[in-house]
Amino acid sequence: MALTPELASSFARTALANVAQEYPAKLDHVMGGPADVRGPRELHPAFYGSFDWHSSVHMHWSAVRLLTLAPDGLQDSTRTSLVDLLDQRLSVPALQIGESNEVLIGDKVIVGGGGRVSRSVAARLVGREEFAGYWEYVLDEALFTAPAHPMWSGAALIGPTGKLVGIGSLQMQQQLPGGKVTPLNMMVPIDLLPPVLAGLTAGGHDLPRRPWLGVLTEEISGRVVIVGATKNGPADRADLGEGDIVLAVGGEEVATLAEFYRAVWALGPPGVTVPLTLAREGDVFEVEVKSKDRMSFLKKPRMH
């Protein structure tokens, strides 16, 4: 659906009306005592209104997108209102983007959560290593910090020079000597952002794609084991099931999640056929899975 002037104006009115409405509000706010009882505007000076923080972020992003995609389709007064909104709410200077190699293991860092300074945690970088997630995800080098921030998602990892060096992604557990388990955060290095930033702000449609199988896997006893599959995804349609063991991709043996994913991605773009060697209940057999573009399985924005 085309973004007509009428549709752009409708979206703009929605964004402006929602961010101006502070109440009703749904807060996710940990209170240590009566002094911590605060309203949405005080807790989130930029992103209040729209019922909750997440929706307010979406409304602000909508304002940015409208000014980027349809500036000439908006009335002068509406365009001015959107610009004024962003100038007023997003008035704090942005952190300067640094490089993750500025931080060495053992260095002090700050993990800044949304809201205000009191939502920041003093931490240290405790590790840098490859990370592979069960959802077809690999980072060549992830950053790990401790102690863990309870609101890690999207938190800023700030290095010793005050620059942004990473973004919070996960809370994990680390087993220490003696069996003690302590939580830590996994951070995505900021170095991955600049090469794709322009593509992301343009909607992400032109960024490179990888073949996607829609399979969930874990490493168990040195084997890549399927533990689930996205309904109606490529793996599900090929009847890959829980408990299947992936032995090889295109004849290349794999023993880790990272090896499995990289072997699939090396075959070509989304749509490429992925030949797998599987073990199931003592039988070893070959199966071909027609990969897809994961974006085609995501819900599209409703234009109404």
Image: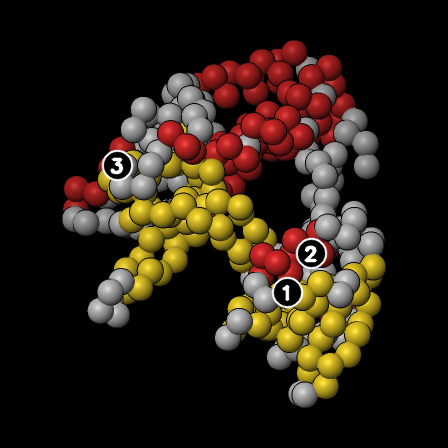
x, y percentage for residue 137? 58, 53
Residues at discs 1 and 2 in contact (Cβ within 8 Å): yes
Residue at x-position 53% and y-position 56%: 132
Using the image as rendered, state which of residue 27 and residue 210 is in the foreground: 210
- Image vertical order of residue 247 relative to residue 299, above or below: below
Residue 29 shows up from this direction: no
SS state under label 2:
helix
Q: Nearer the viewer, mark 3 or mark 1?
A: 1
Q: Identify residue for label 2.
A: 263
Q: Nearer the viewer, mark 2 or mark 3?
A: 2
- The residue lying furthest to the top in this view is 76
Residue at mark 1 to residue at mark 2: CA–CA distance: 8 Å
Disc on the earlier residue, 1 or 2: 1
Using the image as rendered, state which of residue 32 and residue 23 is in the foreground: 32
Q: Which amino acid does label 3 sit on?
A: Lys
Residue at mark 2 to residue at mark 3: CA–CA distance: 37 Å
Residue at mark 3 to residue at mark 1: CA–CA distance: 37 Å
- Could you classify mark 1 by the number of other residues whose Cα lies within 10 Å: few (under 14), some (14-19), or many (20 or more)? many
Q: Quick check: 57 left or right of 39?
A: right
Residue 108 has which mark? 3
Q: Identify residue for label 1.
A: 254
Identify the coloring. Answer: secondary structure
Q: In which quarter of the image is residue 289?
A: bottom right
